[in-house]
């Protein structure tokens, strides 16, 4: 054997310690770059393999890893040895879409770091054919528990996660193509930059008791049907909630630049989500999140010390809610009309009944003022004429706002 061959053989040997870097290099050479942990010992392997042979019983709630706490190393080994060594489901190959991944129904994966793992086809809840005849209790017993799990860049394409518990899970960059999340609990989940193509969300719980939704900045919704979700359960996205926290998770006060960036992310999250909802024809729901985006953008302007834009933004909010609150335009219309009518009555002795003052205010507001009974007093110096001109200017702004508001609201322009 040459020196080169000997070096190669030595390099392929399994690490004899728990050195993280050595194991990662070893897995890389084995073509399993998603593995990061030292391999579990033979006794643990035997135990997991025995559990894997357990025949599921839906009625009794019996599953291979039901109520069993798994570690990342356990999951890595199970994936590598799935289906007698065939390995994990490769979703990039259409021929493998019919394969089922790991059966982790009822298992405990809470708080586990599952970053970058190939969990495509994973079974974490009842299958479609099993669902109709199952009771609520049976459905809950089959649900996998992944609360607080980190699924950064993980592959969950085609996963069956119906009724699954994903509260506060981190799903950033996660691939969820064709994943079944019907009835899943996603309270507080971090879905930023997740790939949500053709995800099934029927009856999914997306908010907590305070109606705070998941974090959705840069999530890719693809062909996911958003119309099947009751979006009234969410009043605020988790991205916005994060901006309201003045301190980090370890209790340190956030820097000004950090909070500014968080507000910018929250603006983007709300706008992107509004666009996705509007594409599904959910205009009323989309308007809510688009409005929140505008209000958050106003905070961004203040933090950027762009006070001119900040105050003008506030004016638009009060006047018409940025076009999403048409009732405000009507309110200010009535306030201006009645307010100026009372002023005309006080200064010009125009009667309130008959409603001369009201008629005068209406015509002045719409820029068609006339001055009956004023005679020669209807000069440019007459207080009523000056007030009518002021009301005409105010009326112009109100009318523009009114038209813009209703155009946006009812025509989506």
Image (tube, rainbow, N blue to C red):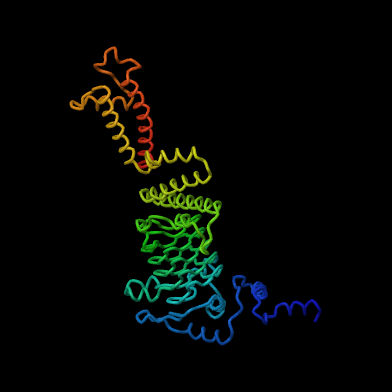
| Residue drawn 45% across the image and 77% down it | 107
| Residue drawn 51% across the image and 46% down it | 303
Which of the 4 quarters of the picture holds residue 411? top left
- Where is residue 384 drawn, in percent x and y? 31, 21
- Report the number of numbered marks: 0
Where does the C terminus fall, quadrant-wise? top left
Which of the 4 quarters of the picture holds residue 117? bottom right
Looking at this view, name the residue that lies furthest to the right.
Answer: 2
- Where is residue 152 drawn, in percent x and y? 54, 65
Q: Is residue 274 above or below residue 311?
A: below
| Residue drawn 46% across the image and 76% down it | 108
Q: Is residue 323 above or below residue 343?
A: below
Q: Is residue 165 above or below residue 248?
A: below
Looking at this view, name the residue that lies furthest to the top.
Answer: 376
- Where is residue 78 drawn, in percent x and y? 53, 78
Which of the 4 quarters of the picture holds residue 389? top left
Please state which of residues 118 and 194 is positioned toward the viewer in this rendering: 194
Where does the N terminus fall, quadrant-wise? bottom right
Looking at this view, name the residue that lies furthest to the left.
Answer: 354
Please state which of residues 348 and 62 is positioned toward the viewer in this rendering: 348
Please state which of residues 294 and 120 is positioned toward the viewer in this rendering: 294
- Where is residue 288 drawn, in percent x and y? 38, 49
């Amino acid at each position: 054997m040459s020196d080169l061959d000997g070096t190669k053989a030595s390099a392929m040997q399994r690490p004899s310690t728990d050195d993280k870097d050595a194991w990662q290099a070893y897995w890389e050479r084995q073509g399993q770059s998603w593995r990061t942990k030292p391999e579990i010992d033979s006794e643990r392997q035997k135990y997991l393999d025995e559990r894997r042979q357990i025949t599921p019983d839906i009625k009794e709630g019996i599953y291979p890893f039901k109520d069993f706490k798994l570690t990342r190393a356990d999951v890595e080994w199970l994936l590598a040895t799935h289906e007698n060594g065939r390995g994990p489901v490769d979703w990039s190959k259409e021929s493998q879409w019919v394969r089922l991944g790991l059966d982790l129904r009822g298992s405990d994966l809470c708080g586990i770091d599952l970053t970058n793992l190939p969990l495509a086809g994973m079974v974490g809840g009842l299958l479609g054919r099993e669902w109709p005849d199952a009771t609520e209790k049976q459905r809950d017993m089959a649900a996998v528990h992944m609360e607080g799990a980190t699924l950064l860049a993980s592959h969950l394409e085609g996963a069956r996660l119906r009724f699954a518990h994903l509260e506060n899970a981190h799903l950033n960059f996660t691939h969820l193509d064709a994943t079944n999340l019907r009835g899943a609990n996603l309270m507080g989940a971090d879905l930023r930059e997740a790939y949500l193509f053709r995800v099934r969300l029927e009856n999914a719980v997306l908010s907590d008791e305070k109606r705070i939704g998941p974090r959705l900045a840069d999530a890719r919704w693809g062909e996911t049907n958003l119309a099947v979700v009751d979006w009234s359960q969410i009043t605020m996205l988790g991205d916005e909630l994060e901006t309201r926290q003045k301190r980090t998770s370890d209790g340190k006060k956030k820097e000004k630049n950090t909070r500014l960036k968080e507000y910018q992310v929250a603006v983007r999250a709300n706008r992107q989500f509004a666009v996705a909802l509007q594409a599904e024809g959910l205009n009323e729901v989309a308007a809510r999140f688009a409005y929140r985006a505008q209000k958050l953008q106003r905070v961004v302007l203040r933090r950027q010390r762009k006070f001119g834009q900040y105050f003008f933004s506030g004016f638009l909010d009060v006047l018409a809610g940025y076009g999403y609150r048409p009732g405000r335009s009507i309110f200010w219309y009535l306030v201006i009309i009645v307010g100026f009518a009372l002023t005309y009555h006080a200064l010009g002795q125009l009667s309130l009944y008959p409603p001369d003052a009201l008629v005068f205010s209406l015509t002045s507001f719409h820029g068609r003022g006339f001055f009956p009974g004023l005679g020669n007093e209807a000069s440019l110096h007459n207080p009523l004429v000056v007030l009518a001109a002021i009301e005409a200017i105010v009326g112009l702004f109100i009318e523009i706002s009114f038209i813009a508001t209703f155009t946006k609201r009812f025509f989506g322009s």
